[in-house]
Image: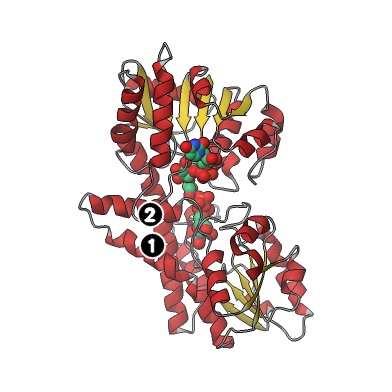
Amino acid sequence: MKISIIGAGYVGLVTGACLADKNHQVIVVDIDPDKVDKINQAIAPIYEVGLPELLERNVPDLLHATRDLRQAVLSTDLTIIAVGTPFNGQEINLSYIREASQQIGSALREKSGYHLVVVKSTVVPGTTDQVVLPILEAASGKRAGMDFGIGMNPEFLTEGVAIQDFMHPDRIVLGGIDTKSIQWMKEIYTGFDNVPQILTNNKTAEMIKYASNALLATMISFSNELGNLCSALGGMDIVDVMDGVHKSNYLSPLQLDGKRIEAAITSFLEAGCGFGGSCLPKDVKALVAHGEKAGARMALLNSVIQINERQHQQMIYRLKKHFPTLEGIRVAVLGLAFKPDTDDMRESPAIPIINDLLQQKAIVKAYDPVTNREAEKRFGRAVTFCGSLESAIEDAQAILLVTRWKEFLRLPEIIRSRQPSPLLIDGRRVLDKTQFHFYEGIGL
Ligand code: UDX
Ligand code: UDX
């Protein structure tokens, strides 16, 4: 199939590279000329495991990038919208969606033959039918359902394993205004055998995405709230508590051979210093705002956000137990990305943690295996960015582990010989607390 994708960010580019690898002819469109150039040289503009190999294999024969949206639409059968949908503080910002729809519609005016437009960006329920569809009709002068179709196909890509998630999906959700739209969309996924397909309308497809992310966010804030309670009450550790919870048959069913199948959701039932990323925070906020506009107050999800926005303070609180004033205290922040195996810093808990430290005049060094450059742009000279784990912690009085990078599991071995021993605050509870002289952890 000939496919154009508008927006070559994490979602658009991963989708494009994977579909090209499945033998579709793909054009990705982006307004950012650097991104376009890099893709056309088969260089990945973002860090995502497996992406360089896919680009190497498929550029230029099956995949190329352009800034020319009109030409991309005219030369393909199907256009996927994958531009960003940030939260603007009040509600979801649909301006990129509107702009993309407008331009696709103008191109469709010149196109003869049927075309399908698919929304992949995460958009609040109703957007595809009530925002995208009317803009496409007005700009193209054509009728949806007659001259072109519209579908909604949410992504369920987890950064770091996005390629794996795309190639081996747990489900494929296909919303559409009619059967023809859905039939065309199914073409994208030929070769994805034995994957459950949920065929529905656009609004339900949009909602499935929000419901999925809201559930994950709720699990995390639930675990964090309990972790904070464990700390406040003392004499117990959230890790042991959750281990007991995880052993329930709901979460890790015991099989007849005595082995357990651990449900992946248990990885969201662990306390930590908060969730970040381009999806969970903005999606929950957008859904709450959207609900409130419709007169549905969402008390639970509102709390999920509030708990998360305060959670990073647990790290500072633990630090201040040992250093009541932070002025002049040398602190190493380990991990800047919002989670491991990505260079993405969006909404990372590291950001408010570093801001708090700087505000209280601590001397901050930071290290992340991949994200240093992005962080340097954000914090400039206020923070010393280090090229290695060792250099980040060499003279630190306190070490804050914020992201679960595997490399940080080396900490016990590195710190063992250090005199005096620094304070280690484990924001992800990944280290063995018995290995450290001075250890603090979320939920301990
Ligand atoms: C995606 C989805 O689109 C978002 O709705 C979902 O919730 C999370 O994932 P993501 O791919 O992470 O967003 O966004 P980003 O990496 O910012 O990529 C968006 C791309 O679209 C950028 O490369 C940007 O340059 C491009 N863009 C944006 C356009 O090409 N045209 C525009 O008008 C706006
Ligand atoms: C998420 C969803 O997992 C994915 O299905 C959806 O399509 C997009 O949003 P992503 O944002 O890439 O993916 O990362 P995810 O692995 O879900 O982690 C989100 C955040 O939650 C990270 O900051 C992570 O550190 C945090 N997290 C996760 C916790 O704080 N505690 C946990 O127990 C699990």
Q: 122 or 248: which is nearer to us?
A: 122
Residue 107 screen position, x and y as percent: 44, 21
Residue on which disc 2 sits = 284
> Which amino acid, mark 2?
Val
Residue 329, disc: none
Q: Please say if 164 is above or below 292.
A: above
Q: Position of residue 140 (x, y in %)?
A: 36, 20
Q: Secondary structure at mark 2?
A: helix
Local packing at callout 1 (Cα closer than 10 Å; few below 14, some 14-19, many 20+) is: many
Residue 18 image point, x, y percent: 59, 32
Give how far across and how far down residue 298 sits, in percent.
Answer: 27, 57
Depicted 426 relative to depicted 61: above or below: below
Cβ atoms at labels 1 and 2 below 8 Å apart: yes
Which residue is painted at 54% across and 56% down in the image?
A: 258
Q: Is residue 190 visible?
A: no
**Between 76 and 383, which is closer to the camera in this rendering?**
383
Q: For disc 2, does the CB lie below 8 Å from ligand 2?
A: no
How far apart are the two marked residues, 1 and 2, measured between alpha carbons? 7 Å
Label 2 environment density (alpha carbons within 10 Å; few <14, some 14–19, many ≥20): many
Residue 168: quarter of image: top right
Residue 407 shown left or right of residue 21 in the figure? right
301 displayed left or right of 316: left
Total labels: the figure holds: 2
Q: Residue furthest right?
A: 417
Residue depicted at x 43% and y 48%: 86
SS for callout 1: helix
Residue furthest toward the left? Answer: 295
Mark earlier in primary sequence (1, 2): 2
Amino acid type assigned to the residue bearing label 1 in the image: Ile
Disc 1 target residue: 305
